[in-house]
Amino acid sequence: DARVTQTPRHKVTEMGQEVTMRCQPILGHNTVFWYRQTMMQGLELLAYFRNRAPLDDSGMPKDRFSAEMPDATLATLKIQPSEPRDSAVYFCAGGLAGARNEQFFGPGTRLTVL
Amino acid sequence: GQSLEQPSEVTAVEGAIVQINCTYQTSGFYGLSWYQQHDGGAPTFLSYNALDGLEETGRFSSFLSRSDSYGYLLLQELQMKDSASYFCAVRDQDSNYQLIWGAGTKLIIKP
């Protein structure tokens, strides 16, 4: 039963600390997306990779956020330094480019920055 | 600009039928999708329409009219477990073919 996995599922940290979230896409999927979801903003796209190459990270605050895909089985999203306004649920999603707009979401990382 | 509009909340009764509408404004339309998200869960894919007309999958159907830039999700024989948020999303040429998301419609089902 192939699925997207994300770690950690929950993270509580203090302002100023570095946060690293990890995602393992489904084997064979060539697109990876990082989304942030809050009650106020809905689903926001932060970064988008195709075949491990970054295609769009315009939704990401560049001064503190960074997203990478060191290999096909791992995508990372880092926040340094974290701020209380970063508190949200961060989802990783993946799929096949051009395939029915179908994205497979991981369970999310619920981040709380105190 | 690119935008999708859908109602923020819809209320219906168990066993009834409900329709959630979505209008969009994008460049280079490449299909309309619907996703379901339960509270505390992740969005899950429901349907995809690339061409005009109705697509049926069990109790759920999705409709698209490209000339009207409009689509809807139809849920029949509502069950309490259908209580969730429903998002429409459009793949758009101007945004590297990524999905543009609506703000979501919270469906409240009453017994």
Image (tube, coloured by chain):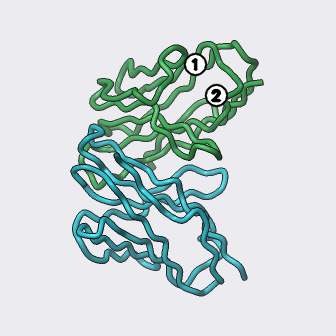
Chain colours: A green, B cyan
The one nearer the camera, B14 or B69, is B69
Residue B98, quarter of the rendered image: top left
| Residue on which disc 1 sits | A79
Q: Residue at x 58, y 39 (%)?
A: A108
A20 above or below B111?
Answer: above
In the picture, the quarter occupied by the C terminus of chain A is: top right
Label annotation for residue A86: 2
| Amino acid type at mark 2 | Asp
- Identity of the residue drawn at 65% across and 83% down: B13
Q: Are marks 1 and 2 in contact (CB under 8 Å)?
A: yes
Q: Residues within 10 Å of mark 1 (few under 14, many from 20)?
A: many
For residue A31, side relative to residue A34 (left or right): left
The residue sitting at 58% across, 61% down in the picture is: B85
Say which of A77 and A60 sits in front.
A60
Q: Amino acid at mark 1?
A: Ile
- Residue at image position (25%, 49%) is B27
